[in-house]
Amino acid sequence: MTAWLIRILPDLRRRDVTKDMADPDQLHKRVMSLVPDDLGADPRAQAGVLFRLEDTRTGVQILVQTQIEPQLSRLPDGYGEAATRQLDGLLDRLQKGSVVHYRIAANPSKRLGKSAGTKAGKLEALRGAAAEQWWAERAAGNGLSVITISSQSQRDVRAKGGIRHAVVRFDGTAVVSDPELVRTAVLTGIGRGKSYGCGLLSLALAAR
């Protein structure tokens, strides 16, 4: 299946950009503007839209992945620099035993059991070693055997309706144990909060 990766370097001097950066729901709408309207009840899933907001040494970037060819012309004029590439080549080269570098911003959490009393059934955000253990287990279930993990807590996302997503970014290396599971994970994302910048799994083949 074809997928596209869009890298947007937004102009932080613009009012519409700063509004997007400050409002998770507005940023979601901006990202969704890159794909056609009227995609049904769950347009994000239908278009395979995933994204991640990153602070880099050169500034902020928005990475967006879609399974429908993006329409960059739908961004406002001057919103920022944008470039697109297809991911087919990378996905095709994934083989069992391939070593990859990975990055993902995820929402690691667990549902509390009966021993939590009145909080039973509620989701608890995970941090530190517990979050890294969550990622190692989740990665294994998606065809990646983790070699190294580093984690960094990101700013919490507080979405419409008071929903809070505690975000942790994971970086490291892993071995592909099941290429088909990994391809599916790249295309569909991992974990909760996909509408708010979580779940986009980025991979790069490690040099031999």
Image (tube, rainbow, N blue to C red):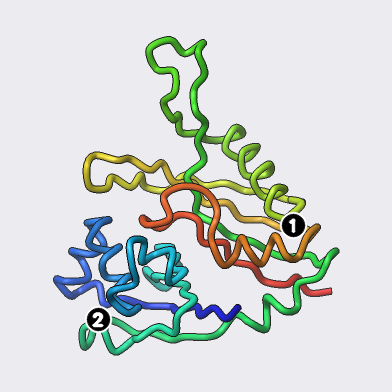
Query: Are there few (<14), some (14-19), or many (20+) residues within 10 Å of tag 2?
Result: some
Tell which residue pokes out farthest to the left in this image.
Answer: 15
Kindly identify the residue that appears in the image at 51 percent across and 40 percent down. Answer: 108
Q: Nearer the viewer, residue 172 or 85?
A: 85
Residue 108 lies, with reference to residue 100, above or below; the image says above
* Callout 1: SS: strand
Query: Are there few (<14), some (14-19), or many (20+) residues within 10 Å of tag 1?
Result: many
Q: On the image, which quarter does residue 76 sit in?
A: bottom left
The answer to whether residue 173 is seen in the rendering is yes
Kindly identify the residue that appears in the image at 40 percent across and 63 percent down. Answer: 53
* Relative horizontal placement of residue 177, taking residue 57 as reference (left or right): right
* Callout 2: SS: loop
Residue 200 lies, with reference to residue 145, above or below; the image says below
| Three-letter amino acid code at the position of disc 2 | Tyr
- Coordinates of residue 111 in the picture (x, y in percent): 49, 28
Of the numbered discs in the image, which one, if any, rests on residue 79? 2
Of the numbered discs in the image, which one, if any, rests on residue 159? none
* Relative horizontal placement of residue 129, taking residue 123 as reference (left or right): right
| Three-letter amino acid code at the position of disc 1 | Ala
Residue 114 lies, with reference to residue 33, above or below; the image says above
The answer to whether residue 54 is seen in the rendering is no
Kindly identify the residue that appears in the image at 72 percent across and 79 percent down. Answer: 92
- Coordinates of residue 32 in the picture (x, y in percent): 32, 70
Q: Nearer the viewer, residue 169 or 137?
A: 137
Q: What residue is shown with label 1? A: 174
How many marks on residues?
2
First in residue order: circle 2 vs circle 1: 2
- Coordinates of residue 198 in the picture (x, y in percent): 45, 54
